Image (tube, helix red, strand yellow):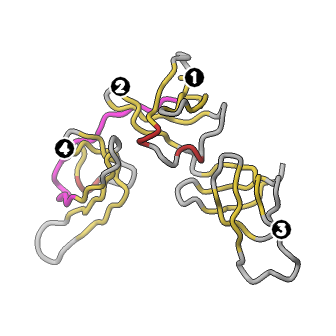
Amino acid sequence: MIRGGDIAKGTILVINSHPHIVVEREFVSPGKGAAFARVRAKNLRNGNVVTQTIKTQEEVEDAQVDLIECQYQYADGENFVFMNNETFEQIMVPMSDHENAQFYLKDGETFSILFYEGEAIDIRFPYKMVFTVVESENYIKGDTVSGATKPIVTETGLTVRVPLFIKQGEKILVNTETNDYVERVND
C-alpha cells in the first residue's frame, strides 16, 4: 500500500483490479480541508486514462511488478518477441497494446519488460536512444533561419524533427518520452 501523498509520476497503482501507471500528479492543498493528489493514470492493459482524487493520508494499492531485462528479437505481426536474458525463454508482448513501440525497438537491443501477475504488460525504453538517419532532405546554405528544423526518418521508421545540418547516415540522440532530437552523436 502507498499513501496518496507519496504517489509520484511513474508509480504503478492497482485501480479497479487493473495496473495503471501514473502519467500526471498534481498536489493540491486547499485553504480548507485536507490536502489531496489529483492523479491521471493510464491503464497498462488497454490504454484507457482515468483521473482520480486521492487524499494524502489515504492508502491505495500499488501494483507489485517485476522488471525483467529482455533482448528484442523480432515482430511476428501480432506480437513483439523478446528473449529473457537469464532464462532464454521467449516472451510475447502484444503489438496492439504498444502501437508506437515499433519505432524504438531495434533487433538485438536489451529492454526492460514490466510484468504484472506473470503477464508482460509494458516495454520500458531508455530515456534517450541513438538512431541512424536513413532519409533526410538536403538544405541549401543560406536557408538557415534561427532554430529551423526538418523531418528525418530513422532506421526504425521513426520521424523526428532535427536541425538542418543533420545529414543522411549520421547518428542522432532522441528523447524517447517526447520524441525530440537531443544532439548529434559522433562515433
Residue 55 placement, left or right of 13: left
Q: Give the amino acid type for the residue marked by disc 2 in the picture.
A: Gly
**Residue 37 position in % (x across, y down):** 24, 62
Which sits earlier in the primary sequence, circle 2 or circle 1?
Answer: 1
Q: Which label was assigned to residue 85?
A: 1
Of the 4 image quadrants, the one containing the N terminus is top left
Q: Is residue 63 magenta?
A: yes
Q: Which mark is residue 156?
A: none
Camera-near label (1 vs 4) is: 4
Q: Which residue is mark 3?
A: 138
Q: Which residues are magenta?
A: 52-69
Q: Are marks 2 and 1 in contact (CB under 8 Å)?
A: no
Alpha-carbon span between mark 2 and mark 3: 49 Å
| Whole-number angstrom distance, CA of label 2 to CA of label 1 | 16 Å
Q: Is 38 left or right of 73, judged from the image as shown?
A: left
Among the 4 quarters of the image, the one containing residue 13 = top left
The 10 Å Cα crowd at callout 1, few under 14, some 14 to 19, many 20 or more, is some
Mark 4, residues whose alpha carbon is within 10 Å: few (<14), some, or many (≥20)? few
Please tell me whether mark 2 or mark 3 is closer to you in this view.
3
Identify residue type, mark 1.
Answer: Asn
Q: Which mark is residue 16?
A: 4
Estimate the x, y position of residue 181 in percent, counting from the top left: 66, 62
Q: Residue, x 25% and y 40% (percent of image)? A: 18
Q: Amino acid at mark 4?
A: Asn
Residue at x 73% of width, y 55% of height:
172
Residue for badge 2: 118
Q: Which amino acid type is marked by label 3?
A: Asn
Q: CA distance from mark 1 to mark 3?
A: 41 Å
Say which label, 3 or 4, has the lower sequence index.
4
Badges 4 and 2: C-beta atoms under 8 Å apart? no
Considering depth in this image, is 54 or 151 the residue closer to the camera? 151
